[in-house]
Amino acid sequence: MQDGNGLRGDLYFTFFSIFLYLFKMIDLHTHSIFSDGELIPFELIRRAEATGYTALAITDHVDVSNIDHIIPRITNAVNALPAVTSLKVLPGAEITHAPPELISDLVKEARKLGAKIVVVHGETIVEPVKKGTNRAGIEAGADILAHPGLITTEDLLLAKERNVLLEITSRKNHSLANGYVAQEAIRFGAPLCINTDSHGPSDFITAAFAREILLAAGIEKTRIDTVFDNSKALIETTLRRT
Ligand SMILES: [Zn+2]
Ligand SMILES: [Zn+2]
């Protein structure tokens, strides 16, 4: 139909498509088969690319037993990618259920082994993560504190001071605390990011859906770009570090 409304509809669709093309997903927390994910790195990367990602970090679960096994293998896959690609891929790690006393050394070890994005598995309300993990992750200088659950004000302020990104997640169960994390981070000025914590092909999301998750967490429309800007800034910092 080419009446007035149809034309406006077409124009709207064109602008919307351009917007989606320009605005792509950044996801700095995903898992491959090297921990409990379903995909080998290349398939994970390809599926992220096909979902319209612009940047991806592969951050498998690590502790002292497997950190030196996993990070070099993820790095091998990333280094083998062609230099020119539409998707920036970063090797990383998620330090998971480590005693808080060991987290600082594990963050250092992860970076030494080549992890560009270091995530700490925070105090989600759906797992018995040891109290003190949020604080230890922030003090250790992790890049991202994943699913920090009912994070305390002291930890929020420290995350703000150290510029550790607090995660809003699309992952089922961990996402139950999204509203609290968003509200408190905004109240105290701590930086947020959004990730999927993908473990399989159905977990990837588009940037448009990521925006909806942020809105649903109670974040005002005008603040949403800042969340993605924080992830972009982290990638730039990471690349400068090397
Ligand atoms: Zn986690
Ligand atoms: Zn994870």
Image (tube, rainbow, N blue to C red):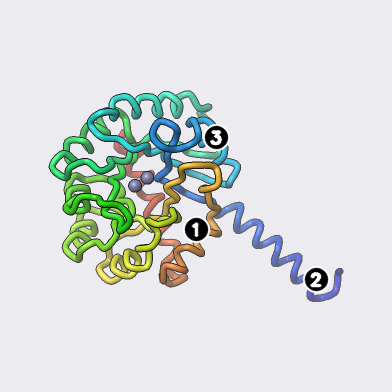
Q: Residue type at mark 1?
A: Ala
Residue at horizontal 35%, vertical 55%?
167
Coordinates of residue 59 in the picture (x, y in percent): 37, 39
Q: Earlier in the sequence, mark 2 or mark 3?
A: 2
Left or right: 19 as drawn, with respect to 104: right
- The residue that disc 3 covers is 85
Instruction: State whether residue 148 is above or below residue 77.
Output: below
Instruction: Specify whether tag 1 is near ligand 2 (CB below 8 Å).
Output: no
Q: Residue at x 58, y 46 (%)?
A: 51
Q: Quadrant of residue 79?
A: top left
From this view, report whether residue 103 is shown above or below residue 171: above
Looking at the image, which is closer to me, 26 or 184?
184
Query: The C terminus is located in which quarter?
Result: top left
- The answer to whether the residue bearing label 3 lies less than 8 angstroms from the nearest atom of ligand 2 is no
Answer with left or right where residue 189 lies relative to residue 47. left
Image location (x, y in percent) of residue 218 = 41, 71
| Rendered location of residue 140, percent (x, y) | 18, 44
Q: Which mark is residue 228?
A: none
Going by the picture, which residue comes out furthest to the left?
101
Q: Is residue 222 left or right of residue 242?
A: right
x, y percent for residue 84: 54, 31
Task: Tell me what residue is drawn at x 28 percent, y 30 percent.
Answer: 67
Q: Quadrant of residue 101?
A: top left
Task: Find residue 6 and name its label.
Answer: 2
Mark 3 vs mark 1, foreground winner is 1
Which disc is residue 210 wearing? Answer: 1
Q: CA distance from mark 2 to mark 3?
A: 37 Å
Q: Secondary structure at mark 1?
A: helix
Mark 3: which secondary structure? Answer: loop
Q: Are marks 1 and 2 in contact (CB under 8 Å)?
A: no
Do callouts 2 and 3 mark residues in contact (Cβ within 8 Å)? no
